[in-house]
Amino acid sequence: VQLVESGGGLVQAGGSLRLSCTASVRTFSSSRYPMGWFRQVLGKEREFVAAISKSGSVTYYADSVKGRFTISRDNAKNTVYLQMNGLKPEDTAVYYCAADESFTVSTTPIDYDYWGQGTQVTVSS
């Protein structure tokens, strides 16, 4: 099972992007799992960005993105989104979505079982 991210690109500071994450296998229902978004800059550790519960009723955000990013999900479409507003150059990274089989919402990468290949987000100043 692989998750597939899309929506990355190049944007100027202050701009917006919306990332999407879907499963590559139709039988994989992401609605069964808490989902998370993480990001990584070359040479640095992967860091937590946002996470959402199965139902979407519970969300967590890193302090660095709180108030600017919004995680949401549409279980009917088997898709998780990350709306990113007010982008800053320090948001530049490869963004990954992930699914956690443990059914609890986690902010730790090691807790996640399925990962996408990542999508590049570049914010120019």
Image: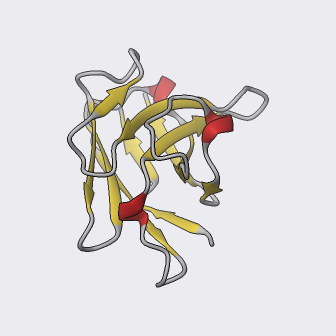
The residue that appears at 62% across and 57% down in the rendered structure is 114
Percent x, y of residue 85: 25, 36
Q: Is residue 104 left or right of residue 101?
A: left
Percent x, y of residue 82: 33, 47
Residue at the far bottom in the pictured view = 26
Give the quarter of the image for residue 68: top left
Residue at the far top in the pictured view = 63
Residue 57 makes an appearance in the image: yes
Give the quarter of the image for residue 74: bottom left
Q: Which image quarter is the C terminus in?
A: top left
Residue 7 makes an appearance in the image: no
Q: Is residue 86 left or right of residue 121?
A: left
Percent x, y of residue 97: 51, 51
The residue lying toward the viewer, choosing from 65 and 100, is: 100
Placement of 3 over or under 37, stated as above or below: below
Q: Is residue 21 left or right of residue 3?
A: left
The residue that appears at 27% across and 65% down in the rendered structure is 75
Placement of 47 over or under 8, stated as above or below: above
The residue that appears at 20% across and 41% down in the rendered structure is 57
Placement of 39 over or under 4, stated as above or below: above
Q: Is residue 120 left or right of residue 34?
A: right
The residue lying toward the viewer, choosing from 125 and 93, is: 93
The residue lying toward the viewer, choosing from 86 and 71, is: 71
Percent x, y of residue 1: 63, 72
